[in-house]
Image: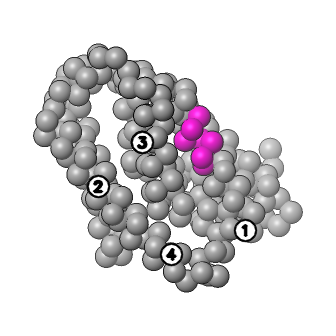
């Protein structure tokens, strides 16, 4: 493995491990054992597309179109506020452990929500297209290797998170644990929204 490949792998893994809407969704699906492989592959595949776009140079769009960054920022704030409110409502209502035992949600519905969480989330764009794309230029002639390392890290992380979540299943057999998870996700989403709005 080249230095560029390892650097891309390490950077991507460091960025993706931060708790966010996408990771929380994958964890939830893993705990429920619903469409885990499809969810993991969708997340990692989306990352692969965005990383490829960043390495190809689309990350410079923000300098060409000054409106792009503010639109991404405020759209992200609105999305994160909505998703946080949704999580707080789920924590308030409770009963998620019982819902986990019911029939699985249809795959198109799950992937539809996941697509919104992934593609409408500004942190996904900033981490993959902008940050990874801009750092890849530090490896002239090896940017493809850098992107490949970053992409492999995404696949490794999401598959581990999705299928490793079942280890936590005994903890989440209790409704209180789901309420704590939902409330925690709500706090994280609103904190990120505040940092985007005021930072």
Mark 1 or mark 3: whose residue is earlier in sequence: 1
Which type of secondary structure does the marked residue at label 2 adopt? helix
- The magenta-colored residue range is 41-47
Rendered position, 71 above or below 15: below
* Marks 1,4: beta carbons within 8 A: no
Mark 2 or mark 3: whose residue is earlier in sequence: 2
Pointer 2 residue: 82
| Residue pictured at 42% horizontal, 21% vertical | 33
Foreground disc of the pair 1, 3: 3
- Using a 10 Å C-alpha cutoff, classify the residue at mark 2 as few (fewer than 14 neighbours), some (14 to 19) or many (20 or more): some
When asked about the image quadrant of residue 62, the answer is bottom right
Q: Which mark is residue 80?
A: none
Which type of secondary structure does the marked residue at label 1 adopt? loop
Q: Which mark is residue 113?
A: 3
* Marks 4,2: beta carbons within 8 A: no
Rendered position, 99 above or below 132: above
Pointer 1 residue: 57
Pointer 4 residue: 69
């Amino acid at each position: 493995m080249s230095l560029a490949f390892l650097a891309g792998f390490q950077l991507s893994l460091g960025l993706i491990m931060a708790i966010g809407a996408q990771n929380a969704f994958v964890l939830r699906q893993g705990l429920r054992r619903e469409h885990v492989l499809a969810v993991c592959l969708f997340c990692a595949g989306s990352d692969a597309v965005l990383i490829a776009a960043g390495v190809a140079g689309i990350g410079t769009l923000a300098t060409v179109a000054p409106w792009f960054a503010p639109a991404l920022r405020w759209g992200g704030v609105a999305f994160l506020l909505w998703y946080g409110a949704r999580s707080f409502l789920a924590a308030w209502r409770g009963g998620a452990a019982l819902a986990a035992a019911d029939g699985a949600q249809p795959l198109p519905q799950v992937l539809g929500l996941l697509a919104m969480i992934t593609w409408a989330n500004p942190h996904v764009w900033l981490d993959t297209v902008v940050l990874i794309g801009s750092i890849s230029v530090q490896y002239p002639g090896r940017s493809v290797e850098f992107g490949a390392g970053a992409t492999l890290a995404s696949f490794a992380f999401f598959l581990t998170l999705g299928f490793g979540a079942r280890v936590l299943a005994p903890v989440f057999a209790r409704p209180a644990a789901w309420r704590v998870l939902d409330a925690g996700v709500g706090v994280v989403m609103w904190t990120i929204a505040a940092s985007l709005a005021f930072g």
